[in-house]
Amino acid sequence: MENKPRLFNLYQLALFLIWAIIACFYLTPNFQDNWFMSVTMLFGSFIAGATSEGGGAVAFPVMTLLFDIKPNVARDFSLLIQSFGMSAAAFTIIKNKIPIQKDVVFPILFFGIIGQILGFFFLDGFLSPKFLKISFTSIWLSFALVLFMQLKRKTHSNIKIRPSYLIYFFALIGGLITALTGSGIDILTFSIITLYYGVSEKVATPTSVLLMATLSITGTIVKFLFSDISSEAIDYWLVCAPIVIFGAPLGAIFITKRSKRFIIYFLQLSILVQFIFSWVILDLNTQLKLWSIFLVLIFSLCYYLIFRRSFKRD
């Protein structure tokens, strides 16, 4: 008889106690001023656990575009909140023995952390917030468009992958993007192991959650050791931490019972909403609009070629 996945565990309790101690010694969280972030992460944490997009993929655009919060504050918050929410989801995945693609985890983490450190020390603050946001949402959209081809393709839940330079490259770029926006390693990992290796979306999703949780923790540690975590980010984190440690695991368990078609449509919808949201809210000039269209076209072609090369290997 199949064991029913367990949502609540001691890891979540430990995270809750850590939050409570910090809240007592720091400041009592002011929900009256920052309640909008609690509502944002109520949905963001569920999406983080249920898709290959981290909570930061929801938090970053909402904070920077809708509430006009500085990108560095949104990035710091994303790393902090994912260290709690997505690590709780990752623990739930491991505890319930939800399948992941184990043979790519350590290579991706190694190159992802290198990319993340390089991003922190050499690229942080170098690119404009509008350029960053429209670039990444455009790249994600190109992946979502090509992902339609996965619907009729046979995928694998139990396959051995020999890590290649393609994986190393995507991991490195994912680490760089994570350093700038708070997420990125998850969706890039998901894209390469599904399109190129044909890994089942039901395996790729929890794998990406585990990777994003780890890079969120390492990113938070690096920021604490070598830089400053924004005090605003901590204030937002205080009103969201109790929510995400249950929301993200709920999303992780929810998606395990869904079909391949549902997972693909759910991910595509979340990416499309982000892209439209960016175009509507951002005051894009002509150059940025053309840049966005160019990225969608060129990366759609790249993802398509990756998919076709994989198809020849099948």
Image (cartoon, rainbow, N blue to C red):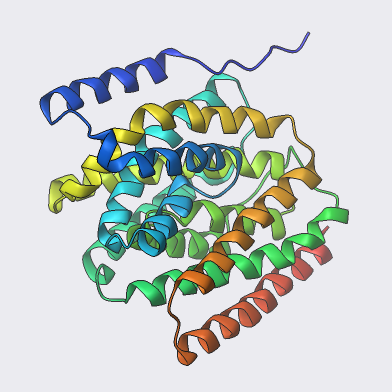
Relative depth, front residue between 275 and 185: 275
- Quarter of the N terminus within the rendering: top right
**Residue reaching furthest to the top:** 1
Give the image location of residue 106, x and y in percent.
Answer: 47, 44
Residue 217 sits in which quadrant? top left
**Quarter of the C terminus within the rendering:** bottom right
Looking at the image, residue 21 sits to the left or right of residue 141; the answer is left
Give the vertical position of 212 relative to 1 (above or below): below
Is residue 286 or residue 229 the one in the foreground? 286
Q: Residue 171's spot in the image, x, y percent?
A: 48, 58
The answer to whether 31 is drawn above or below residue 197 in the figure is above
Mark yes or no: residue 45 visible: yes
* Residue in the image at 37% along x and 44% along y: 36
Work out whether residue 199 can be spotted: no
Q: Residue extending furthest bottom? A: 286
Position of residue 105 measured from the top left corner of the image (x, y, whole percent): 51, 43
Find residue 233 and report its horizontal and vertical position in percent: 24, 47
Locate residue 25: give its quadrant: top left
Q: Residue at x 75, y 38 (%)?
A: 157
The number of callouts visible is 0
> Which quadrant of the view contains residue 177?
bottom left
Left or right: 228 as drawn, with respect to 277: left
In-front residue for pair 161/120: 120
Viewer-nearest residue: 154 or 162 = 154
Tell me the residue at 53%/28% (across/down): 249
